[in-house]
Amino acid sequence: MVIREIEKSDIKDILDIRVSTKENHFSMTDLADVGVTPESVAEWLDGSVNGWVCEISGQPVGFALADSKTAEVLVVACYPKFEKKGIGKALMHKIHDWLWSFDHDEIWLWSDPDPGVRAYGFYRKLGYEPTGATKGNDEMLKLKRKAS
């Protein structure tokens, strides 16, 4: 497993990974409807968004994106056949290290509040806690910086 920074040449691969997910599934049309297109991702990567891709045998199998200005984790996803192999956790650690380097006191994300959804336990095991804020069917979770 190799984890490296996302490059613009990875955009097609990461969007393919995103639309392959079973939980919180989005089609390419769904993504476009919320403003996620190859062009918008390229613009984000020119701004405050960065991310990492996980490769196995040279093939991208997972990725994560975050925004350094807002300290938001935007997405973490991997192909279904690569789930439960530590890829998401490894990507989140890269994202956390990067966001903490901007001196944020907390990192946040939106996630499904249903305990039956894998993301529910995944983020909580990483230390994220619900804030009570909601948007649509999602709740805001925050991870506070640990005191050093």
Image (cartoon, grey):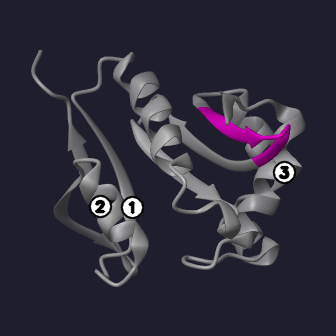
Q: Is residue 139 visible?
A: no
Q: Does residue 34 sit above or below 103 in this rendering?
A: below
Q: Quadrant of the N terminus?
A: top right
> Who's the residue at 24% across and 49% down the image?
142
Marks 2 and 1, how far apart in space? 5 Å
Is 57 one of the magenta-colored residues? yes
Q: Position of residue 89 (x, y in %)?
A: 45, 46
> Who's the residue at 38% across and 74% down the image?
112
The residue most toward the left is 147
Q: Nearer the viewer, mark 3 or mark 2?
A: 3
Q: Secondary structure at mark 3?
A: helix
Marks 3 and 2, how far apart in space? 27 Å
Q: Which mark is residue 13?
A: 3
Residue pointed to by mark 1: 110
Q: Position of residue 131 (x, y in %)?
A: 17, 60
Q: Quadrant of the C terminus?
A: top left
Q: Quadrant of residue 137?
A: bottom left
Foreground residue, 117 or 74? Answer: 117
Q: Does residue 28 sit above or below 54 in this rendering?
A: below
Which residue range is magenta in the image? 50-60
Q: Which mark is residue 69?
A: none
The amino acid type of the residue labelled 3 equals: Asp
Q: Secondary structure at mark 1?
A: strand
